Amino acid sequence: MKDNSTPLKNEFLKGLLKENPVLVMLLGMCPTLAVTTMASNAIGMGLATTFVLVCSNLVISLLKGVIPKAVRLPCFIVIIAGFVTLISFVLERYIPSLYESLGVFLTLITVNCIILGRAEAFASKNKVLPSVLDGLGMGLGFTLALFAMGSVREIFGAGSWFGMKLPVISKDPMLIFIMPAGGFFVLGCIIALVNKIADRRPPQEISCENCPSAAICGKDKSECGASAESEAAQ
């Protein structure tokens, strides 16, 4: 749980890149790979998930003092399912083409680990406004990740973007991009790009050479190595 003194803008911005649910935490992989063959489907799924995230975080934060701890997860799922049903009815009535394209994955938003995870880890422990901003940021981060994947896969795999045919590419599209293997490839490339932008590096082994406290430690290398071996043995 974040400290309540954390600026509210950080609760919103963290989900866009730093703690992006798809590109950093690797959550929601099923809809991410399944519905991103077209940019329009990706936007639709992202916005529907954002709506459910914001509304469920709002209600759960309001009811956090009322819901018994023993049944909190079933209660969270019921609340989330209610908003998923609502958005499903809206899409079926007003955007039937998107409703049909998303298919069963729209219903599966109910068990999306992003939504349930934010409900359990954040909304149930924080006030209303931070919870709403957390849901909005995570939802928009999810939407941006899906939109990026959907755009790349549709452009190279179908030679179009939002259904509009693109010159040159549309004549000979690379169908591999709209297949499952292409989805994994595009996801990996985008994750690598995000890690490069955020300058994330794999953890390095701590030793006397790169230990930040080497100057004040007082141990020589042999003592350090012996200590490490004894700790590993225990």
Image (cartoon, rainbow, N blue to C red):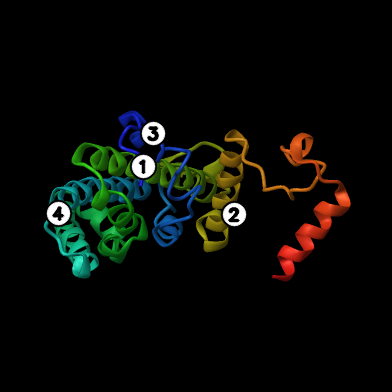
Q: Residue 227 appears at what percent x and percent y? A: 77, 58
* Among the two numbered marks 4 and 2 on one chain, the one whose residue lies closer to the N terminus: 4
Q: Quadrant of residue 144?
A: top left
Query: Secondary structure under badge 4?
Result: loop
Which residue occupies the foreground of this view, 203 or 108? 203
Residue lying at 31% horizontally and 41% vertically, measured from the top left: 134
Residue lying at 17% horizontally and 53% vertically, measured from the top left: 64
Query: Secondary structure under badge 1?
Result: loop
Front: mark 2 or 1: 1
Q: Quadrant of residue 70?
A: bottom left
Which residue occupies the foreground of this view, 55 or 172? 55
Which residue occupies the foreground of this view, 50 or 87? 50
Report which residue position mark 1 lands on: 2
Q: Residue 41 appears at what percent x and percent y? A: 35, 50
Report which residue position mark 2 lands on: 185
Q: Residues within 10 Å of mark 4 (few under 14, many from 20)?
A: few
* Among the two numbered marks 1 and 4 on one chain, the one whose residue lies closer to the N terminus: 1
Report which residue position mark 3 lands on: 13
Front: mark 1 or 3: 1
Residue lying at 50% horizontally and 47% vertically, measured from the top left: 23
Amino acid type of the residue that numbered disc 2 sits on in the rendered structure: Phe
Q: Residue 197 appears at what percent x and percent y? A: 59, 34
Left or right: 219, with 188 as reference point: right
Q: Mark 4 and mark 1 in contact (Cβ < 8 Å)?
A: no
Query: Secondary structure under badge 2?
Result: helix
Asked if residue 143 is positioned above or below residue 224 in the image, the reply reads above
Gap in angstroms between the C-alphas marked 1 and 4: 18 Å
In the rendering, which numbered label is found on residue 65? Answer: 4
Q: Residue 83 appears at what percent x and percent y? A: 16, 55
Amino acid type of the residue that numbered disc 1 sits on in the rendered structure: Lys
